[in-house]
């Protein structure tokens, strides 16, 4: 079944008059503000805060999407997978709190992902970064100018378990490593000019990358698996372990280095 992006056709609820891109951005923004309020309520211990935030934001996002886009499929990290989505051409894929640890620690590098896959492709996305000063929202329908790359490239990696491939490629490029938390924060760092390459091979799921990839592609960045193959969504197995997001003029060199390292290790 094929799907098409909405242009504002009425479905149900006040949010149904929004385009898909407007809806994604609105939901990510509101969920981010809800999460900040949950954290600032002072009602949860650091150990309980992550779960409380995940559950609260998930309930809001899923309820809102079912109200405004009842015919679409839905996949969320925080809900039991409903394989009815596999029959849908349009599937919303959300991560209510990407970087639960960072959220619980009151760090800035966590995100909210709201994305729409159409026929398996990352069509629309919004990534909220509520922990940044004043909050930041990046969206696929409103691309911003990406700052030019510095002479010494920067590669953003996990702050707790950087992938060995990323470290090896960074060494070959003489790139600076920039540790950061959530996948969404790392992907958006390339757009915001905080990094130049995001290479991940340590295991992820569709909700970790769909919205960030949709936003990154809309900003003209290269997005693929680390073997250069396309990122395909709404699969039965939602494990999508690796990705590369970078400027297009760096992609060929990075992919070649990954291939050389893979061949050497193999």
Image: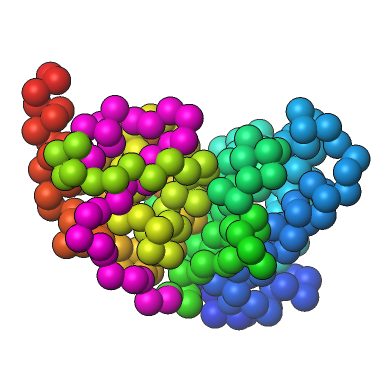
206 and 37: which one is in front? Answer: 37
The residue sitting at 25% across, 62% down in the picture is: 150
* Residue 115 seen in the figure: yes
Q: Which residues are magenta?
A: 144-170
255 and 162: which one is in front? Answer: 162
Q: Name above or below for residue 212 compared with residue 49.
A: below
Q: Name above or below for residue 156 compared with residue 159.
A: below
Q: Is residue 155 magenta?
A: yes
251 and 229: which one is in front? Answer: 251
Quarter of image, res 55:
top right
- Pinpoint residue 241: horizontal percent, then vertical percent: 38, 33
- In the rendered image, which quarter contains the N terminus? bottom left
Residue 125 relative to residue 226: left or right: right
79 and 101: which one is in front? Answer: 101
Q: State how the image is colored.
A: rainbow
Q: Name above or below for residue 16 compared with residue 153.
A: below
The residue sitting at 14% across, 39% down in the picture is: 172
* Residue 84 seen in the figure: no
Residue extending furthest top? Answer: 266
- Pinpoint residue 39: horizontal percent, then vertical percent: 79, 47
The residue sitting at 75% across, 52% down in the picture is: 35
- In the rendered image, which quarter contains the C terminus? top left
The residue sitting at 55% across, 71% down in the picture is: 21
- Pinpoint residue 230: horizontal percent, then vertical percent: 27, 49
Figure label count: 0
Residue 19 relative to residue 66: left or right: left
Q: Name above or below for residue 156 compared with residue 21.
A: above
Residue 214 relative to residue 245: left or right: right
Q: Is residue 81 magenta?
A: no
- Pinpoint residue 199: horizontal percent, then vertical percent: 31, 43
């Amino acid at each position: 079944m094929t799907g098409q992006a909405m242009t504002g056709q009425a479905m149900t609820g006040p949010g149904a008059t929004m385009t898909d891109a407007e809806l994604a951005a609105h939901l990510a923004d509101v969920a981010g503000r809800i999460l900040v309020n949950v954290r600032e309520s002072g009602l949860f211990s650091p150990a309980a805060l992550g779960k409380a935030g995940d559950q609260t934001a998930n309930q809001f996002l899923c309820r809102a999407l079912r109200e405004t886009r009842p015919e679409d499929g839905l996949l969320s990290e925080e809900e039991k997978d409903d394989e009815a989505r596999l029959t849908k051409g349009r599937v919303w894929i959300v991560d209510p709190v990407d970087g639960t640890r960072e959220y619980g620690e009151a760090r800035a590098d966590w995100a909210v992902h709201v994305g729409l896959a159409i026929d398996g492709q990352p069509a629309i996305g919004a990534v909220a970064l509520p922990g940044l000063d004043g909050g930041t929202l990046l969206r696929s329908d409103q691309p911003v100018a990406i700052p030019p790359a510095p002479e010494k490239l920067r590669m953003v990696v996990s702050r707790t378990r950087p992938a060995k491939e990323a470290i090896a490629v960074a060494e070959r490029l003489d790139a600076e490593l920039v540790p950061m938390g959530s996948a969404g924060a790392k992907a958006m760092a390339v757009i915001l000019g905080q990094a130049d390459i995001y290479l991940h091979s340590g295991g992820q799921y569709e909700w970790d990358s769909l919205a960030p990839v949709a936003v990154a592609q809309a900003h003209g960045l290269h997005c693929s698996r680390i073997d250069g193959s396309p990122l395909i969504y709404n699969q039965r197995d939602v494990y999508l372990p690796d990705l590369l997001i970078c400027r297009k003029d760096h992609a060929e060199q990075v992919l070649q280095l990954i291939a050389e390292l893979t061949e050497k290790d193999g």
